[in-house]
Image (tube, helix red, strand yellow):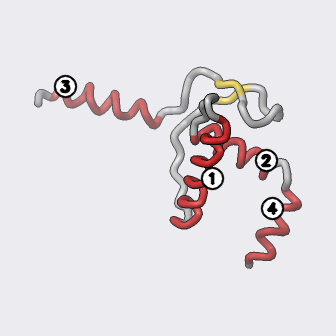
């Protein structure tokens, strides 16, 4: 592989991690009219991720034929939680 091809490939792969340049309409909340999407890494409990996957699959089935992406689903869950800070706080206190 030539150095030019390698550099082009690295540049293309690096774009995946750059913030989106176009604002995207907020699907889950009217709180923020527009935002950009970006790639983020979170480390979550595996059992919780499995539960999220099941809940997403069930909801996607219920909403058929309208499609919903997993990112839309997660954004809706997070936006709902952000709108309920007292309930989230109480839940976290109960768990600790």
- From the viewer's perspective, is 9 left or right of 67? left
State yes or no: discs 3 and 4 in contact (Cβ < 8 Å): no
Q: How far is disc 3 from disc 1 in space, using C-alphas? A: 42 Å
Q: Secondary structure at mark 3?
A: helix
| Sequence order check, earlier mark of 4 and 1 | 1
| Sequence order check, earlier mark of 2 and 3 | 3
State yes or no: discs 2 and 3 in contact (Cβ < 8 Å): no
Residue 68: x, y in percent?
Answer: 61, 34
Q: How far is disc 4 from disc 1 in space, using C-alphas? A: 19 Å
Q: Which residue in the protein does label 3 denote?
A: 5
| Sequence order check, earlier mark of 2 and 4 | 2
- From the viewer's perspective, is 78 left or right of 7? right
In this rendering, the label closer to the viewer, 4 or 1: 1
What residue appears at the point 64 percent right and 23 percent down from the top-left corner? Answer: 23
Of residues 90 and 56, which is closer to you in this image?
Answer: 56
In this rendering, the label closer to the viewer, 2 or 1: 1
Q: Secondary structure at mark 4?
A: helix
Mark 3, Cα crowd under 10 Å, few <14 / some 14-19 / many 20+, is: few
Task: For the N terminus, give its image quadrant.
Answer: top left
Q: Which mark is residue 88?
A: 4
In this rendering, the label closer to the viewer, 3 or 1: 1
Residue 50: x, y in percent?
Answer: 54, 60
Q: How far is disc 2 from disc 1 in space, using C-alphas? A: 15 Å
Q: Secondary structure at mark 2?
A: helix
| Sequence order check, earlier mark of 3 and 1 | 3
What residue appears at the point 85 percent right and 53 percent down from the top-left corner? Answer: 84
Residue that sits furthest to the right in the current view:
86
In this rendering, the label closer to the viewer, 3 or 4: 4
Of residues 17 and 70, which is closer to you in this image?
Answer: 70
Q: Which residue in the protein does label 1 denote?
A: 55
Q: Which residue in the protein does label 2 denote?
A: 80
In this rendering, the label closer to the viewer, 2 or 3: 2
């Amino acid at each position: 592989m030539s150095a030019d091809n390698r550099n082009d490939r690295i540049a293309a792969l690096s774009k995946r991690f750059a913030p989106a340049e176009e604002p995207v309409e907020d699907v889950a909340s009217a709180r923020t009219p527009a935002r950009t999407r970006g790639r983020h890494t979170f480390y979550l409990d595996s059992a919780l991720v499995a539960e999220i996957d099941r809940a997403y699959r069930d909801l996607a089935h219920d909403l058929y034929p309208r499609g919903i992406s997993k990112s839309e689903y997660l954004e809706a869950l997070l936006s709902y939680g952000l709108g309920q800070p007292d309930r989230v706080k109480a839940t976290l206190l109960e768990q600790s």
